[in-house]
Image (tube, coloured by chain):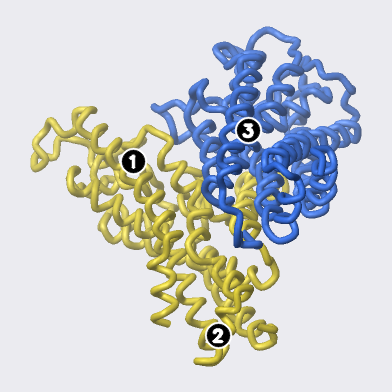
Amino acid sequence: MTFWRCFRFDFAEGLRTSWPALVAIGAVGFANSVYFYSLLSFFPDGCASFGSFLVGFCEGVTAPSTQDLSRFRFPVAWLLGIALVLYATLRFPCRDVAGFGESVVVRCGKRATWWLSKCLWVAVYTVGCFVVAIVAVGLAAAVTGAPFALTIENLQGFAFYDPDVVVIGPWEPLAFLLTYAAMLVGLSLLQLTLSFLLRPSLAYLATLSLAFASALASSPLLPCEYLMAARSSLFVDGGVDSWQGFAFAALLALCSLVAGGVVFVRKDLVDTEVDE
Amino acid sequence: MQVELNKALVNRWFFVALTIGCSLVCASAVVSVSNFYGWGFGSFSADRYYQLSTSGAICAWIGISRLDTTFLPWFFFGVAPLLACLPYTWSFRSELMSGYFAQGTTRSTRCQCMLAKFAAVFLSSGLTVAAPLVLSYLVVSCFIPGYVPDPGEGLSVPIEESYPFSSLFFSRPTLYFLAITSFDFLLCGSWGVVVLAASFVVKNRVVLVAGSFLLQYFLHYANSTFMPLVFGNYFRLQYNLPSLLWPVANGDVPCLGLALALIALGTGGSLAYCLAKIRREQL
């Protein structure tokens, strides 16, 4: 069984089992954009483009001050977007190693082929989730009559907006959005590796912990730091560099791919529980 | 019942969840204790009562976390819905698929087996969050004096009069701790049995555990975005597990009566549903 045939099978089967998560991501993207639009009504000068709506979806939160944690509000919408994407790619690869999937592993000839196919599926599906979110946000932007441009002219309406902190606009979010997609792929691959190393539930807990830690602390070593517009140097002074985040995401993805491959090749697949 | 309790509480998933919870609260307690002494509170003699009463053990406890300047309390209460479901909520579906549950019903009735499972899930889910809360209070109480908070200390007072059990907080702090811990125990236990009831419908245990966590954050998201838009800021319905477990952080005061009614509804409804379903379930 060639690599591409294996991937084609994964693509069809993965889409069949994981499509509800795509719908949920679209719904959250649309709902968040509607909420963002409702916030803009409080600002007389607030004008939003398609790019504003997109950045609103992955806004995040500024790093909480240790002196005043009581005013910190957890970025639930941001976390929900990441949790849904990670959830979308959590179940299928581990489920597919048992039952009929076990015979697919055998027919692949080499375990590495199966593993690479699953990694590619995870990457494609994660990007697919992001594209669905973009389409949902675009739909909401179109409904509200926002201009279809990525450039952001005004940051009013964003929770992180502070005239003393934001850099001079207009703002081009393309680098940030590319980094967002790349980092999601990196995190999903890390979760895939952990789910074979530990268990899917614990892998989900571990990757979500990274998101929690990034929201509540601030360090360029925390991967989810690069998933927040509120901490990007494109928008605020002293933020993290998006291209640095892109390189970090690529490194994370590569390490996960190699480490996961080593784990999977040595893993005992006999009697793997189907429903785990 | 004994077998189920044994399976629920002597179980590696319970151990894993408890270890994660206890590690987080212990780390938070260490930060609180070091801040207590680092900020100079400990340099005074405890019996002379020079320091703020709001720097006592009850305020250092993770349920209040006035002395913890890290993200650890946020993290603990943020992942608590997942920790509560991790130990045993998935067991019914797993045993149903393996045939273990059917074996059990040959030794006692289906309802008895279900009741035992229900009690074990309630207890394990509740304990996963309540036990770390107790541990946190024990640890901070070993190092920080147990002052009774004075409501007259203005901005340093972490909770307001309208908060649940606030009168206990300002009069009998240990009773306040017990009341909040029991409340959190009931909340998590109730959520555990709701997830158990959902396992009649959801067949995959990863979906069950991770999906239930996502559902709580969906509620949290809806509560913090659309509810204020619809009902206004004065009527924010923060009835989701992360907010109810730690209302101090969210600043949204839940109505205690409504929260208890939700617990009763969740537990009673799940019990009725489980007992009704198990009679008809093909084992």
Taking depth in this image into account, of B278 and A33 the one nearest to the observer is B278
Q: Are marks 2 and 1 on the same chain?
A: yes
Three-letter residue code for mark 1 = Ser
Kindly identify the residue that appears in the image at 68 percent across and 66 percent down. B203
Residue B89: horizontal and vertical position, in percent? 54, 66
Tell me what hue chain A is rendered in.
Answer: blue
Secondary structure beneath dot 2 equals helix
* Cα–Cα gap, marks 3 and 2: 42 Å
Q: In the image shown, does B216 or B164 lie closer to the viewer? A: B216
Q: Quadrant of the N terminus of chain B?
A: bottom left
Q: Nearer the viewer, residue B127 or A269?
A: A269
Outermost residue, top direction?
Answer: A168
Q: Which mark is residue B28?
A: 1
- The chain letter for the residue carrying disc 2 is B
- The colour of chain B is yellow
| Nearest to N terminus: mark 2 or mark 1 | 1
Q: Which residue occupies 78% across, 17% down? A: A152
The quadrant where residue A158 appears: top right
Decide: marks 3, 1 in contact (CB < 8 A)? Answer: no
The quadrant the C terminus of chain B occupies is bottom right
Q: Which mark is residue B103?
A: 2
Residue matched to label 3: A257
Cα separation, mark 3 vs mark 1, equals 34 Å
Same subunit, tags 3 and 1: no
Q: Residue at x 57, y 37 (%)?
A: A262
In the displayed structure, does residue B48 sit left or right of residue B51? left
Disc 2 residue type?
A: Gln
Locate residue A30: give its quadrant.
top right
List x then y, in percent, for residue A19.
Answer: 80, 50
Q: Secondary structure at mark 3?
A: helix
Q: Residue at x 60, y 42 (%)?
A: A265
**Position of residue B155 measured from the top left corner of the image (x, y, whole percent):** 36, 35
